[in-house]
Amino acid sequence: MNTHSSTLSARHRIGKFWQMLLAAATIVGILSLIVLIYNVVNEAAGLAVIQYSVDPKLVLPKPLDELTNEEMIAAIEENLSKGAYQRANTDQPFNTRTKSELTKFVQERVLEEEVKGTWSLTDSLFKADQIRADAAKNYPKARLEFRQWLTLDFITQPMSSNPLYSGIRTAILGSFFVIVLTIVIAFPVGVGAAIYLEEYAGHHWFNRIIQTNIDNLAGVPSIVYGMLGLAIFVRALEPFTSGAIFGILDSNGRTIISAALTMALLILPLIIINGQEAIRAVPNSLRQASYGLGATRWETIWHHVLPNSLPGILTGTILAISRAIGETAPLIIVGASTFIAFDPNGLFAKFTVLPIQIYNFTQQPQDEYRNLAAAAILVLLVLLLALNSMAIFLRNRFSNRL
Amino acid sequence: MTNSQHSTGHYLLEAHNLNIYYGTHKAVADVQFNVERHKITAIIGPSGCGKSTVLRAFNRMNDFVPTCRVEGDVLLDGQNLYAPDVDPVEVRKRIGMVFQKPNPFPKTIYENVAWGARINGFKGNMDELVESALRGAVVWDDVKDNLHKSGLSLSGGQQQRLCIARALAVQPEVILMDEPCSSLDPIATLKIEELMRELKERYTIVIVTHNMQQAARVSDTTAMMMLTDDRQSGTVIEVNETNTIFTRPKDQRTEDYVTGRFG
Ligand SMILES: Nc1ncnc2c1ncn2[C@@H]1O[C@H](COP(=O)(O)OP(=O)(O)O)[C@@H](O)[C@H]1O
Ligand SMILES: [Mg+2]
């Protein structure tokens, strides 16, 4: 009895040891996630010193906040070149702009305000006094303000050479165009292949080779797809992907359609494999019931197999899409542009996408671009989180129906 | 469907020299037996002797097992179901099937019944067809207020009767049932048996069962299947009126089996 109970307590000790090890692994995972989010948020808001490059006393009759609309328009007309004034006026006539819009315009274009330095959120909260002293000493004419870098303007404004006014609108639109087109291409092809492989293809050696290849393609590094896209879509198919055969002559093959075709290739194996799994999960008894009533193969697939596997297929597709949204390497190779100030306007437009935009922000020498990168990362993360929640929702909503 | 070389005309369904293989394994050997119109024919025998395999040969459900190969003829009304010009989809429309485990579609009760009729081109009044099929399967009173609830919300016995109604709605000539009561409780089982006796007025039924009492209770004719001496293949060793099979079997093995001495 004694020897028995001592071995039992030893067994419990071993169990406890493993339990603690597993808990430690979980904690490491959660901690890294927290550090990641902290890092991003830490840069996405904080104190910034902002200074007018042009002394307001030289160009404005009185302090900015005391000017009337008319006085501001007069100042704008006086200090901008005729061409620039005209262009801004055709964008939106000055006499229809609100006071805050005009104030902003004066700050940006007349006084040419710029960021002189930024601090992280933690520093801004805990070392505010020291920062204030430093700023007063080094930039006596500047103002120190608490700035949130992720603003509505940041999301809705196009890129600009001044980081204070730069937004990610073109990158968001680019990502959106590329992803929608990718889905349009990859979803039907992928689901079609999944149906064929599961419901029609037998265990012929040829089909088995195809299956093995698809399984392996899912693991090919994305940069390889980039090389493939460059060779096929950008170079070989340039007359098509540049839109030349449709009469668009000012473009090369580095367009949205090339990017989408490359991304479609990249996620196709994922969609096929996930689709096959979802189709395989439809119980055979359902197919038999259908065939037993005198249904054809296609009727069985269309009325029973597809409706019952659709949630699984969609879940897999959404996960594939969220992978595509975050992909950077293949699109750099395919040739996403780095600076795009205009909205993409069709299949054959040059483009940039969010992750590339983020990469570009981090490559700039000025400090404040790090804040912009953090803000853009937040946008990307929220997007991905939304997509993944959708996938989880679909899975839970429909998984218990059979 | 033109082939009629063996037909005697007396039987609705005939199996001639049926050999069925799974790959190289001959699961069923030399099966020879006939099914009379408007009768219930039971196939009994121990597990694994090929009862389901034979049953599936009657409506070409074996086509879906890639390794399965059928040799010999199955005649429906004198027409060989395995002739090259026969469309197996047409065969399954004429010979319906009810499976071991109730398998209603994850659709409404109404849709469960209507779907098969609709894809087979039914043009009449669908509501009437659904009601008559559900009445035919004696499940109408259970579901008439819940036609738009999921078929999966029913109890096991109700689900099985829904599956029978679904088969009836296609208006087949023969209904094959593969151990239709094996997952049901005794009361549900009795209801299904009662239903089968009603159905034989209008349909011909072949039922596989390993429950001898059930065969004795419902069937008119019984086919006894058994593994051959090499224990590789199953075959029909005796077909006769059910009464005879259970009281005066000709084959010693049948007697051993029906009296429970089978080991
Ligand atoms: N899909 C299949 N693939 C391979 N062998 C099968 C398959 N179905 C049945 N068999 C084999 O055929 C024989 C008869 O099976 P089955 O017809 O299911 O018998 P029963 O219905 O009498 O229990 C068994 O040996 C079984 O292993
Ligand atoms: Mg069986």
Image (cartoon, coloured by chain):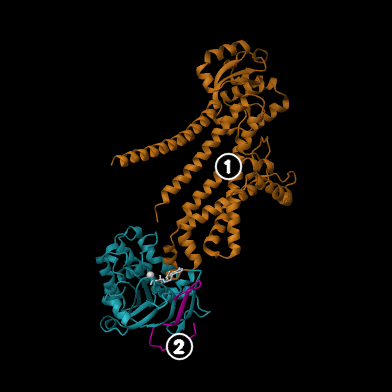
Chain colours: A orange, B cyan
| Residue occupying the point 66% across, 21% down | A112
Q: Can residue A387 be seen in this view?
A: yes
- Pick the quarter of the image with the C terminus of chain B: bottom left
Tell me: residue A287, above or below residue B24.
above
Pick whichever, A12 or B167, lies toward us.
Answer: A12
Pick whichever, A302 or A61, lies toward us.
Answer: A302
Determine if the magenta segment contains residue B11.
yes
Q: Residues within 10 Å of mark 2 (few under 14, many from 20)?
A: some
The answer to whether residue B72 is left or right of residue A175 is left
The answer to whether residue A357 is left or right of residue A389 is right
Q: Position of residue A245 (x, y in %)?
A: 73, 52
Amino acid of disc 1: Ile
Tell me: residue A82, above or below residue A198.
above
> Mark 2 = which residue?
B6
> Mark 1 = which residue?
A325
Q: Residues within 10 Å of mark 1 (few under 14, many from 20)?
A: many
Q: Under 8 Å from ligand 1: the CB of mark 1? A: no
Tell me: residue A229, above or below residue B223.
above
Q: Under 8 Å from ligand 1: the CB of mark 2? A: no
Q: Where is residue A187 in the image (x, y as percent from the top left)?
A: 56, 52
Tag 1, which secondary structure?
A: helix
Q: Mark 1 lies on which chain?
A: A
Tag 2, which secondary structure?
A: loop
Q: Which region is colored magenta? A: B1-27
Disc 1 to disc 2, C-alpha distance:
67 Å
Do circles 1 and 2 both sit on a common chain? no
Q: Position of residue B225 (x, y in %)?
A: 36, 77
- Exactly how many numbered labels are in the figure? 2
Tell me: residue A67, above or below residue A159.
above
Amino acid of disc 2: His
| Residue occupying the point 32% across, 64% down | B183
Q: Which chain carries label 2?
A: B
